[in-house]
Image: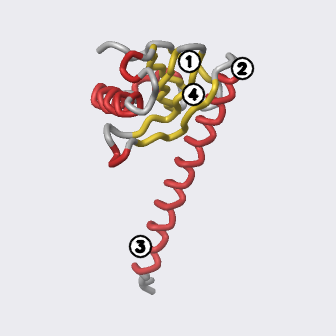
Amino acid sequence: MTKHMDFSQLQAQAVISRGDAGLRAYLSGASAEAGVVKAYAERNADLLEQRWRGEGGEGGEIDLILREGDTIVFVEVKKARSFDQAIARLRPTQMMRIHAAASAYLAFTPEGQLSNVRFDLAAVDGTGQIRIIENAFGHF
């Protein structure tokens, strides 16, 4: 006996699965960011912005913007199974977009481009451990 598949159901399942994967990725990223915010708070840093985007999307999104003393810290959060995989996910083109977005953000601060700034990478592994790499991509 030949069994016929209903491809409309199969397609609907694929869409649902893809949506579930997107939701899982979003929640995983949000959880990683929350852990990183907590780690910076333990260092007495103040959260200024989360997932900041300039008007018109100038430069892209900055995951976290914090103030640590007199320094504005722009943080890119990367999550993967291992620290090495997380670190490898930060690409040069993304660094350039983050720099452009940071420049747009600084235009709204009193110190402007004269602000002390730092660009950190916060790597989060599969167990939720966090490794903060200060000045990870200040110059490239």
Quadrant of the image occupied by residue 126: top right
Residue 55 in the image: x percent, y percent?
37, 46
Between disc 3 and disc 1, the foreground one is 1
**Crowding at label 2, few (<14), some or many (≥20) Cα neighbours within 10 Å?**
few
Q: Label 1 amino acid?
A: Ile
Mark 2–mark 4 distance (CA, rounded to whole Å): 16 Å
Mark 1–mark 2 distance (CA, rounded to whole Å): 13 Å
Helix, strand, or loop for circle 1?
Answer: strand
- Taking depth in this image into account, of 92 and 41 the one nearest to the observer is 41
The reply, left or right, for residue 69 in relation to residue 10 is right
Name which of mark 1 and mark 4 comes first in the sequence.
4
Disc marking residue 124? 4
The reply, left or right, for residue 127 in relation to residue 110 is right
Residue 7 versus residue 127 in the image, above or below: below
Q: Determine which residue is flagged by label 3.
A: 11
The reply, left or right, for residue 26 in relation to residue 41 is left
Between disc 2 and disc 3, the foreground one is 2
Helix, strand, or loop for circle 3?
Answer: helix
Q: Label 3 amino acid?
A: Gln
Q: Residue at x 40, y 79 (%)?
A: 7
Helix, strand, or loop for circle 2?
Answer: loop
Name which of mark 1 and mark 2 comes first in the sequence.
2
Name which of mark 3 and mark 1 comes first in the sequence.
3
Q: Determine which residue is flagged by label 1.
A: 132
Q: Determine which residue is flagged by label 2.
A: 42
Q: Label 2 amino acid?
A: Glu
Mark 4–mark 3 distance (CA, rounded to whole Å): 34 Å
Between disc 4 and disc 3, the foreground one is 4
The answer to the question of whether label 2 and label 4 lie on touching residues, with beta carbons closer than 8 A, is no
